[in-house]
Image: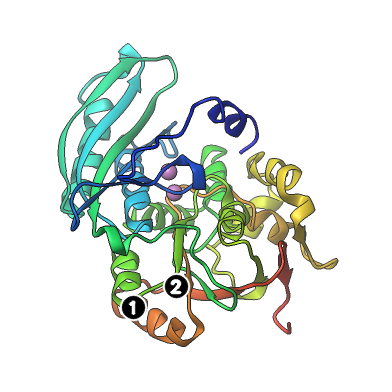
Amino acid sequence: MGRLAQVLRLVPPSTDPRVLVDIRTSDDAGVFRLTDDIALVQTVDFFTPVVDDPYLWGAISAANSLSDVYAMGGTPVTALNVAAFPPGLMDADTLGRVLLGAADKCREAGVAVLGGHTVEDAQPKFGLSVTGVVHPDRVVTNAGAREGDVLVLTKPLGTGFLVSAVKKGLLPADGYDRVVASMGTLNRAASEAMMAVGVDAATDVTGYGLLGHLWEMCLGAGLGAEVVVERLPVLPHVEAMRALGAGTRGPRQLYEHLGCHVDLPSDLEPWLRDLIADPQTSGGLLIAVAPGRAEALLAALHERGVDDAVAIGRMVGGDRIRVVGASA
Ligand code: CO
Ligand code: CO
């Protein structure tokens, strides 16, 4: 988006026919056909600490990095740690706990951590490079949505507000437990459900918020979308934390980029306007499914314990995102 997109235009895209998905579609991961039956899904993600607890930071980073493979319908198989740490924190209590949190989350996912790379940096950063596999004919991209598809979101929104609230010492303990659990939850069950039912498109909701990632889905499909704001799943305390000053610059930046493509109801409450643009850490999958399969998808998600999964809107003709109230 923006400046980065301009820079990437300087790099000629690969002409290798085995490249099935690359940066050209702003998708979650790259996909490379290895044989007629196996394609590699590759992704890398790393970021600054979201919580003080090093173990939880490692686990959340791992869940977030693995998510890009799940969003493409792939099965992650191996991972490499990517770490930048101040020399004073390269000890067992900090870097060691981060790596352990990531390793435990990878073990839960059935992913082997093969190694990694650590450099010195004043500002700590951590994440994973993940390799997965998928059948070349079963790749789910963010570009395949069709008009009329139902949009399903699998995790509640609000992590940007709540992580900011944690850093300001504002978030009550029950809210902290809930947001950490949500960010640490793998999108594996959600991905398995969508692959079992068959869907048209998917992406995971991360740094560009619900609106930003939905907009990429719209661009990829040449369609617009409608989001029913009352249906959105929300983590507890978001409205109260925003009122106390928690939040990021994310929503404002997103509306500067996308505002001209989004129609908001004139009476939309400001916290909801910000919520749909709130940058998510390790957010849920946003799935576009044919209307005839939407009930089956929701049942498959709930059966697998993805309890917050809910239909939030649909793909429509046109080239705008329309945010509407419950009655529409
Ligand atoms: Co992603
Ligand atoms: Co990513």
x and y, in percent, of residue 106 in the image: 21, 47
Looking at numbered disc 2 in the image, what kind of residue is underneath it? Ala
Element under label 2?
A: loop
Q: Residue at x 20, y 46 (%)?
A: 34
Q: Is residue 54 left or right of residue 91?
A: right
Q: Residue at x 39, y 15 (%)?
A: 121
Q: Quadrant of residue 189 in the image?
A: bottom left
Colour treatment of the image: rainbow
Label 2: how many Cα within 10 Å (few below 14, some 14–19, many 20+): many
Looking at numbered disc 1 in the image, what kind of residue is underneath it? Val
Give the residue number, with chain letter if any, for mark 1: 197
x and y, in percent, of residue 263 in the image: 78, 63
Label 1: how many Cα within 10 Å (few below 14, some 14–19, many 20+): some
Element under label 1?
A: helix
Closer mark to the observer between disc 1 and disc 2: 1
Q: Quadrant of residue 47 in the image?
A: top left
Quadrant in which the N terminus appears? top right
Q: In the orientation shown, which residue stands out farthest toward the right? A: 266
> In the drawing, what numbered circle is on residue 309?
2
Q: Quadrant of residue 56 in the image?
A: top left
x and y, in percent, of residue 91 in the image: 23, 20
Q: Residue at x 33, y 65 (%)?
A: 191
Quadrant in which the C terminus appears? bottom right
x and y, in percent, of residue 7 in the image: 57, 26
In the figure, 33 relative to 120: above or below?
A: below
Q: CA distance from mark 1 to mark 2?
A: 15 Å
Ligand 2 falls in quadrant: top left
